[in-house]
């Protein structure tokens, strides 16, 4: 059954946890969709885990549309959320609506996500008014890495926690259908979750959120550059891939691959083959 924004709203109401993973390509999205994941986030994290950038700031609208289209082809049932990249919504409300529309119209996203609290309430409201569902994102917002001075936990002081709660309420009031809480102390994330009627999706925000999201390269140990504290490795696919690559190299160099079972014979007798050798 297809997951919609109504589905996740009902899941919050019933206490059923929402599952979300990042996806950036057709084949991975198809595998995830077949396991029954509720939502797929085409995150601007693709800048780091797919394109090799140091952060998410270099990701463009064209990057996001390209990858979102691929994910939509693989996802039949999951709700696909496309990230709005840096400077695609900060310049003006009109620009935000236009770019959100592109992610839906060209990329096929069911919803869009943008970072920030009160400072983006007008963008959230306008995008929502254009009939495009919006996921908010507060706490550690990677597009603000330079302003924050790095990837740091947010909301650890009383004042900072108050601001996060206020931002969450602003996001909800502006019309967002859900909000991602990233790198927030678990007790603060739980308070926010209790105060909102819309679902909260945590990433490094504890078990009190309505759902969880992880970057799939992190949870499968495919991305070795950096592993945040909140990541649990559910399968060491990285090591399995390294073993597979190494075995392929060894067998190719030794001549063991390809064997007869991996090759086609020619439908001709030896005399015909001998004649071909004389050409």
Image: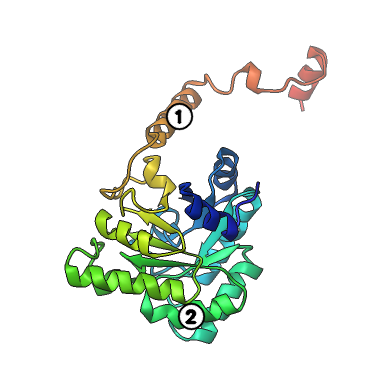
Q: Is residue 105 left or right of residue 13?
A: right
Judge whether 27 appears above or below 257 on screen.
below
- Which quadrant of the figure has residue 66? bottom right
- Which quadrant of the figure has residue 156? bottom left
Task: Give 259 or 115, whichever is nearer the viewer.
Answer: 115
Residue 241 makes an appearance in the image = yes
Q: Position of residue 222 (x, y in %)?
A: 39, 42
Q: Position of residue 80 (x, y in %)?
A: 57, 57
Label 1 sits on residue: 244
Q: Is residue 74 left or right of residue 64?
A: right
Which mark is drawn over residue 137?
none
Label 2 sits on a secondary structure element that is: helix
Label 1 sits on a secondary structure element that is: helix
N-terminal of the pair, mark 2 or mark 1, is 2
Task: Give 23 or 258, whichever is nearer the viewer.
Answer: 23
**Badge 2 density bin: few <14, some 14–19, many ≥20, Cα 10 Å:** many
Residue 116 makes an appearance in the image = no
Which mark is drawn over residue 123?
2
Judge whether 162 appears above or below 95 on screen.
above
Q: Please say if the residues under marks 2 and 1 sit with CB atoms less than 8 Å apart.
A: no
Determine the residue located farthest toward the top in the rendered image.
270
């Amino acid at each position: 059954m297809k997951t919609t924004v109504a589905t996740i709203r009902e899941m919050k109401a019933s206490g059923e946890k929402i599952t979300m993973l990042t996806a950036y390509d057709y084949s991975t999205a198809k595998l995830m969709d077949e396991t029954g994941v509720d939502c797929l986030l085409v995150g601007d994290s693709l800048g780091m885990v797919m394109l090799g950038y140091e952060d998410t700031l270099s990701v463009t609208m064209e990057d996001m549309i390209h990858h979102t289209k691929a994910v939509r082809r693989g996802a039949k049932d999951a709700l696909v959320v496309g990230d709005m990249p840096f400077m695609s919504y900060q310049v003006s409300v009109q620009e935000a609506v236009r770019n959100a529309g592109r992610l839906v119209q060209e990329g096929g996203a069911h919803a869009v996500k943008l970072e920030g609290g009160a400072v983006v309430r007008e963008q959230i409201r306008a995008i929502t008014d254009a009939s495009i569902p919006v996921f908010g994102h507060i706490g550690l917002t990677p597009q603000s890495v330079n302003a924050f001075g790095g990837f740091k936990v947010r909301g650890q002081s009383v004042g900072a926690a108050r601001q996060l709660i206020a931002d969450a309420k602003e996001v909800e009031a502006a019309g967002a259908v859900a909000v991602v809480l990233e790198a927030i102390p678990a007790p603060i994330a739980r308070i926010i979750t209790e105060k909102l009627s819309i679902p909260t999706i945590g990433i490094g925000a504890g078990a009190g959120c309505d759902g969880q999201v992880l970057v799939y390269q992190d949870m499968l140990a495919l991305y070795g550059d950096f592993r945040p504290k909140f990541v649990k490795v559910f399968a060491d696919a990285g090591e399995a891939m390294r073993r597979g690559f190494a075995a392929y190299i060894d067998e190719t160099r030794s001549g063991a691959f390809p064997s007869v079972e991996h090759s086609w014979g020619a439908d001709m007798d030896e005399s015909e083959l001998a004649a071909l050798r004389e050409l």
